[in-house]
Image: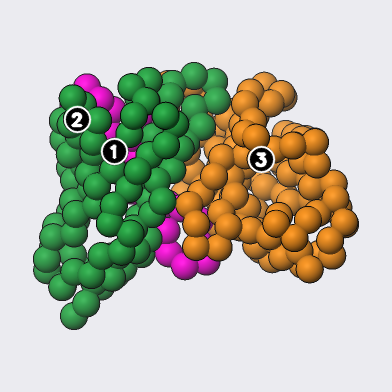
Amino acid sequence: EPEVTQTPSHQVTQMGQEVILRCVPISNHLYFYWYRQILGQKVEFLVSFYNNEISEKSEIFDDQFSVERPDGSNFTLKIRSTKLEDSAMYFCASRIRGSAYEQYFGPGTRLTVT
Amino acid sequence: QQQVKQSPQSLIVQKGGISIINCAYENTAFDYFPWYQQFPGKGPALLIAIRPDVSEKKEGRFTISFNKSAKQFSLHIMDSQPGDSATYFCAASIPGTASKLTFGTGTRLQVTL
């Protein structure tokens, strides 16, 4: 069964460093998302991406964040200068088309900022 | 107005019992209501979902009940099993290109023997 994959599973970085989190969405999906979950809290929307552009972003997704689909398979989230409060699980999700709302999540990347 | 409120925060149910988790929303533009199951260290997994045009949807031991007038929906897990022990999140989304999910705060379910 197709699934969303994410790498790395765990990333440790120092405050102020740049990190890139990678995702491979399900191959025939067209809509891509990043969510984050601070330990013990709910899952929060960061950004959605469709047709090679951001379709919506939350207030969390400030200028330090960017997303890119560099090729036909990968979808990346870049944090330019990490802060301690960026420590969280980051989940990538994808869905197939406009009329099908089911979003499928990857296993997540645990980002630890020290 | 974008919030989805979920209760209880935690729930302990005996094996074979019924687990009930409730959610409420304010925004009537929400048009899709999924439930996700999350095990520790894993991503949320889609369990079951409902649209507002039906009042109930059943898949195996899992049932969603939907009350459009009260703006509430709930997940019922029949014959709860220890393997059901996980955190459950309700969510809602508005149709459109983004269709971002707004999640509830989660319910940690423990099913005891």
**For the residue carrying disc 1, how many other residues have a C-alpha within 10 Å: few (<14), some (14-19), or many (20+)?**
many
Q: On what subunit does the disc labeled 2 rest?
A: B
Residue B28, picture quadrant:
top left
Residue at which label 1 appears: B24
Residue appearing at x 77%, y 40% in the figure: A65
Rendered view: B31 above or below A38? above
Regarding mark 2 in the picture, which secondary structure is present there?
loop
Residue at which label 2 appears: B70
Q: Is residue A99 left or right of residue B78?
A: right
Name of the residue lying farthest toward the bottom: B113
Name of the residue lying farthest toward the front: B1
Tell me the amino acid under the disc marked 3.
Answer: Ile
Tell me the amino acid under the disc marked 2.
Answer: Ala
Colour chain A is painted in: orange
Q: On what subunit does the disc labeled 3 rest?
A: A
- Decide: marks 1, 2 in contact (CB < 8 A)? yes
Which mark, residue A60? 3
Q: Quadrant of the C terminus of chain A?
A: bottom right
Residue appearing at x 85%, y 46% in the figure: A80
First-in-chain label (1 vs 2)? 1
- Decide: marks 2, 3 in contact (CB < 8 A)? no
Spatial CA distance of label 1 from label 3 is: 24 Å
* The magenta segment: B32-54
